[in-house]
């Protein structure tokens, strides 16, 4: 079969569909069942007996009758009935019918008819737009796709790998996805119209001529415990008369979405005695290809927030600033690309914490990018008393991390009621009680 369109109506071929697939093969019929044997025939009746012979005439001599006539003979007896016939033999089973072969696929030819009525092109395949490649770039070109940021697609290559010329006016566009919104329509830019393409022809939509812009969804809250991780993807498409070419839907695949600066790790002790000091070290990693900490890329800062019974000590080198609310802020003015930096906050357990033994005091380290908190890490410092080897006591109370403040208070009240003095040895701390055996 053939489908023909006028040269000026070439785009209409995208609406034509032809089904020329041959019919399926058919199975042959099953053979018939064998015939039943015939019933035996009945025997024939016996023959009737023969009639008796007639008597002889009287004898005559010299014209005179000298004897009487002979008597007739008696009739013969009837014959016996014949025997029944034999039963007929069973008929043979019929043979199965042969399978019918499948139908041969048909052939369709698409034709373009010129103004004179002559066929100017014909093929068994229509035109087809296939996307070959394109470049995807983040908005500030640091190699990282951030939440809430925009990215670009440019330098799109399209090929006509069909059997007929691709008509002009096919639309290159990008439907929205759950992880990327196409911004061009809101800016008054619709699909990009492609020129006509000969069979096997290719066309580049250069970035200087057209760039396609997209928005990645933002995140409302910072990630806790680990850097933020997500993915974004777009699916470009080329359509003719609103019919998309399947080979034009070349997805970008999953593109990682993350922040360019991330918390690599936090080092902090889990216990302190009142009056003791330690350092909480926060390490920051720049995973991008550009430096951060100043404009235009954005400021980077770490803020440490503490429980009121913990206090930030002034930085000897001025690396961070203690704020009026008791928190501490370190601003990084330069975090080189693919580099890790750190800050060590000096923290002390206040003397007032002595009334809150075995309480866990929370702290939180926030990472800020361009004034927005993008990630945080949290931890706790347990108020653990120091072992006093020179102090004699009635009872040595050995503690471990499983003992909480409620259990500690129960023991304290019990010992007070008994009038016993107490000293503490923390298994968590790794006390030096063994080297002070004189205590025992």
Image (spheres, rainbow, N blue to C red):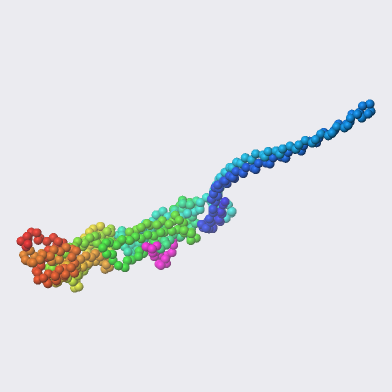
**148 part of magenta stretch:** no
Query: Residue shown at 9%/61% (left/top)?
Result: 433
Is residue 39 among the parts visible in the rendering? yes
**351 displayed left or right of 293:** left
Q: Position of residue 47 (x, y in %)?
A: 75, 38
Q: Position of residue 171 (x, y in %)?
A: 46, 60
Q: Position of residue 377 (x, y in %)?
A: 24, 64
**181 part of magenta stretch:** yes
Is residue 345 among the parts visible in the rendering? no
| Residue range of the region highlighted in magenta in the rendering | 177-192
Residue 291 location, quadrant: bottom left
**391 displayed left or right of 68:** left
Residue 262 location, quadrant: bottom left
Q: Is residue 384 positioned above or below 38 on the image?
A: below
Q: Position of residue 347 (x, y in %)?
A: 16, 66
Query: Residue shown at 27%/68% (left/top)?
Result: 372
Predominant SS along the magenta part: loop
Query: Residue shown at 57%/44% (left/top)?
Result: 96
Query: Residue shown at 67%/41% (left/top)?
Result: 41
Out of 196 and 5, give the one closest to the viewer: 5
Out of 44 and 226, give the one closest to the viewer: 44
Out of 314 and 197, give the one closest to the viewer: 314
Residue 316 location, quadrant: bottom left
The residue furthest right is 63
């Amino acid at each position: 079969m053939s489908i023909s369109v006028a040269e000026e109506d070439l785009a209409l071929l995208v609406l034509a569909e032809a089904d020329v697939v041959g019919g399926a093969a058919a199975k042959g019929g099953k053979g018939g069942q064998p015939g039943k044997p015939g019933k035996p025939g009945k025997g024939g009746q016996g023959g009737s007996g023969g009639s008796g012979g007639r008597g002889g005439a009287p004898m005559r001599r010299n014209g005179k009758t000298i004897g009487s006539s002979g008597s007739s003979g008696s009739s013969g007896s009837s014959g016996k009935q014949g025997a029944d016939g034999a039963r007929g033999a069973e008929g043979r089973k019929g043979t199965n019918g042969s399978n019918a072969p499948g139908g041969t696929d048909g052939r369709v030819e698409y034709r373009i008819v010129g103004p004179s009525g002559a066929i100017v092109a014909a093929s068994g395949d229509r035109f087809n737009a296939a996307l070959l490649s394109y470049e995807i770039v983040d908005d500030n070109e640091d190699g990282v796709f951030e939440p809430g940021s925009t990215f670009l697609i440019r330098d799109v290559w399209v090929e006509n790998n069909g059997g007929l010329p691709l008509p002009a006016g096919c639309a290159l566009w990008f439907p929205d996805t759950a992880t990327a919104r196409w911004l061009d329509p809101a800016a008054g830019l619709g699909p990009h119209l492609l020129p006509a393409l000969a069979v096997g022809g290719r066309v580049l939509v250069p970035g200087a001529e057209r760039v396609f812009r997209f928005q990645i969804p933002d995140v409302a809250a910072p990630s806790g415990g680990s850097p933020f991780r997500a993915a974004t993807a777009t699916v470009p498409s080329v359509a003719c008369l609103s019919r998309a070419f399947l080979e034009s839907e070349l997805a970008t695949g999953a593109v990682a979405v993350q922040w360019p600066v991330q918390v690599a790790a936090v080092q902090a002790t889990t216990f302190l005695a009142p009056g003791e000091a330690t350092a909480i070290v926060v390490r920051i990693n720049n995973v991008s290809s550009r430096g951060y900490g100043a404009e235009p890329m954005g400021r980077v800062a770490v803020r440490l927030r503490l429980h009121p019974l913990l206090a930030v000590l002034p930085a000897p080198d001025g690396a961070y600033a203690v704020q009026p609310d008791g928190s501490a802020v370190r601003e990084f003015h330069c975090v080189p690309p693919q580099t890790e930096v750190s800050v060590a906050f000096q923290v002390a357990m206040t003397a007032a914490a002595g009334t809150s033994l075995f309480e866990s005091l929370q702290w939180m380290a926030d990472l800020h990018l361009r004034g927005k908190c993008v990630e945080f890490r949290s931890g706790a410092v347990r108020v653990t008393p120091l072992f006093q080897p020179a102090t004699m006591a009635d009872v040595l109370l050995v503690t471990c991390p499983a003992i909480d403040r409620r259990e500690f208070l129960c023991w304290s009240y019990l010992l007070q009621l008994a009038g016993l003095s107490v000293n503490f040895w923390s298994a968590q701390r790794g006390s030096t009680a063994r080297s002070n055996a004189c205590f025992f």
